[in-house]
Every structure is written in structure tokens, then in C-alpha cells.
Amino acid sequence: MVLAAVCSFPPIVSAQPGVLPSLRPVPRKGIAANRVFLHPDCLLHLAGTDHPERPERLIAIQSALADRLAGKGGFTVPRPATPADLLSCHSQEYIDLVRREIRNGAPTLSTGDTQISPGSLAAALAAAGTVMTAVDAVLTGDARTAFCAVRPPGHHASRDKGMGFCIFNNVALGARHAQRKYGISRVLIVDWDVHHGNGTQDIFWKDGSVLFFDTHLENWYPHTGAASEQGEGKALGLIINRPFARGAGRTEILGAFRDTLIPAAERFRPELVLISAGFDSRAGDPLGGLALSDADFADLTDLVRGIADRHAGGRLISVLEGGYNFEGLASAVAAHVGRLAAER
């Protein structure tokens, strides 16, 4: 039933990799303003009928975006990642562990609190490959911006550990793909999920080529992300955490984007912008505690698009993370994608 719903997508188009154009604004005629990427295999990961991270999340997003995308290219079905693709961010030992534990029918990854099922490897490879395909589309000029509707989420997964519903770090793999295939030297990753993106932070902790900016609920899972966590070595000062008290919303979070992120991006001058777009920071999310509204997500999107326009030729890719109130997730994603696709 669920797979049938996904297979009824509007017309499918394929993104083809190619050569990176110069980093000037992408021409507006002849390419999609925004493409939405979704692989049906992302539905194969089953954490349990009472688990908040369920396939219905993507079905809700599909339903919310179907009318918007009708006649505009529809959903783009990407390629899945290969195990070799994962080595840019994850160790061979961890990749082997994931494959072995899924094959052996383990209910949970031994590295952390991530439930798994027989379809979890296919779903995780599809999620990672979705982001890589979106990078190809944006960096070859096939789209100006992209939204990746993926699950399982990724920002808690570090080099050697999956946790917090995450298996592989989708947004980090997208950043590395852009760097290795297209020669991008500076990537900005913005994470507005209610939970701190500890895995992304760990992967780029000493890197120096990625500016990581994260707003999240303080004293909340995974209990990392203090403002004092700022990176090491070449990355010192390129890890920026802004934790907020329960109930914080538009004033505090948009304020941090304006007062901290925009000046940091001005100094860093990213060539590509990625968003870890978690919508569990929306008011009413069962795993949340922040109070953002759909309009707030739209305005956050505008702020990040402004950074991409100024420094990265408009190139922006958004990657789904959390969001567990299905109705709220759908409406917040619709507001976000609407601003990604808006003419500027």
C-alpha cells in the first residue's frame, strides 16, 4: 500500500551529472527552479509501527507537494549510493557492521539507538544517494535549488557510529561528494533540527572546509552542541552552536541566523550551501520543544537562500532530517519548498 502510493508520483525526471559551471547565479530559463528528490527505497526502512520515524513521514510530504509539483517535472528519482560512496565520511568497519547487523536481523544497531529492519540498508543507501544526485543536479545547472525527502535521517551518524534514528550521514556525504567530484572548497551546512547534529559536527570537527551552524534545543538529545564546542585545528571557529531554551521560537532562532550565521558566512564565503532541514523544531512536534511556525521556516529558508545567492551562485540543497508530527511536517515542508522554488 505504501509503495503503491510512492509509485503514483507525478512524471519522473532524471538528474545527470556533468561538469561544474562557474559559480555565478544559475540562468533562470531552461532549468528547474527547484527539484524535489525522493527514492521509493527510503520507505523500506521500518523501525516499528509505534516508532515516530515511519514511512508515513514521506507519504505526508508527497501528498503536500504533489499539487505544487504537478506539471513542473514532478519528483526526481535519484540513484542510490554505493558502499564505496560512503567511505568519504564513514569507516569501512562501520559500513561492514551495518551490513552485517541488518543481514543478521538485528533489531537495533549495536552502535546506538537506531532501529533497523531488512530494508534498512537499501533505504539508507537510497537516502545518501538522493543527496548526491541532488548535488549533481545543482552543481551541473540542472536545478537552482533542491529538496531531498529522505529517511532514515542522518545528522546523528558519525564516522563510526549510527544513533538517533540515523545510519549514514546524508548531508555530510553530500558535502564530500561536492568537494571530491566538483572541486568545491568551502561548504556551509546549516542545521535547524531540534536536536543537535552531533554526527555532522564530529565528521567536520577538524576539517576546515565546512562551516557548520546548528540551532537546537539545549539539554536535549544527544546532549551535545554547547556554544563552547567550536571545532579544532583548521576548523576552530567553523563549528557554531546556538542552543536555546525550551519554548524558543522565531525571535531567538531567526535572530541567531541574522546576528551570527550571516556574518560567519560573509567571512567564510561558501561555494555551496546545504541545510539539515529538521522540522521537529516546529511547534507541536512530539519529539520537540521549540516553537517555530511554518512561516518561520519559510523565512529561515529566505535567509539561507540569501547567503547562497550572495556567495554560492544560488546553489542550495536541503536535506530532510527530523519532523514527527505528520501534518505539521507536511505543512512546514510545503512552506520551505515554496520558498526554495520562489523566483528571486
Image (cartoon, helix red, strand yellow):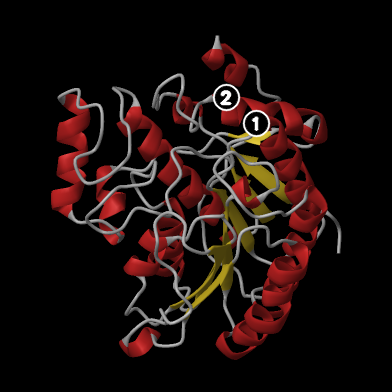
Quarter of the image where one finds residue 117:
top left
Where is mark 2, residue-wise? 56
Residue with the most extreme top position = 1
Q: Is residue 326 above or below residue 197?
A: above
Quarter of the image where one finds residue 70:
top right
Kindly state the secondary structure of the residue where label 2 is placed: helix
Q: Residue at x 65, y 55 (%)?
A: 290
Where is mark 1, residue-wise? 326
Front tag of 1 and 2: 1
Q: Amino acid at mark 2?
A: Glu
- Which of 78 and 239 lies nearest the eye of the viewer? 239
Q: Quadrant of the N terminus?
A: top right
- Which of 30 and 170 lies nearest the eye of the viewer? 170
- Which of 343 and 25 lies nearest the eye of the viewer? 343
Q: Residue at x 73, y 63 (%)?
A: 300
Where is residue 274 drawn, in percent x and y? 56, 62
Q: Are marks 1 and 2 in contact (CB under 8 Å)?
A: yes
- Which of 51 and 26 lies nearest the eye of the viewer? 51
Residue 27 shows up from this direction: no
Where is residue 103 drawn, in percent x and y? 18, 26
Could you classify mark 2 by the number of other residues whose Cα lies within 10 Å: few (under 14), some (14-19), or many (20 or more)?
some
Where is residue 116 drawn, in percent x and y? 31, 30
Q: Is residue 253 above or below residue 291?
A: below
Q: Which mark is residue 54?
A: none
Quarter of the image where one finds residue 179:
bottom left
Q: Residue at x 72, y 26 (%)?
A: 63
Q: Amino acid at mark 1?
A: Phe
Kindly state the secondary structure of the residue where label 1 is placed: helix
Q: CA distance from mark 1 to mark 2?
A: 7 Å
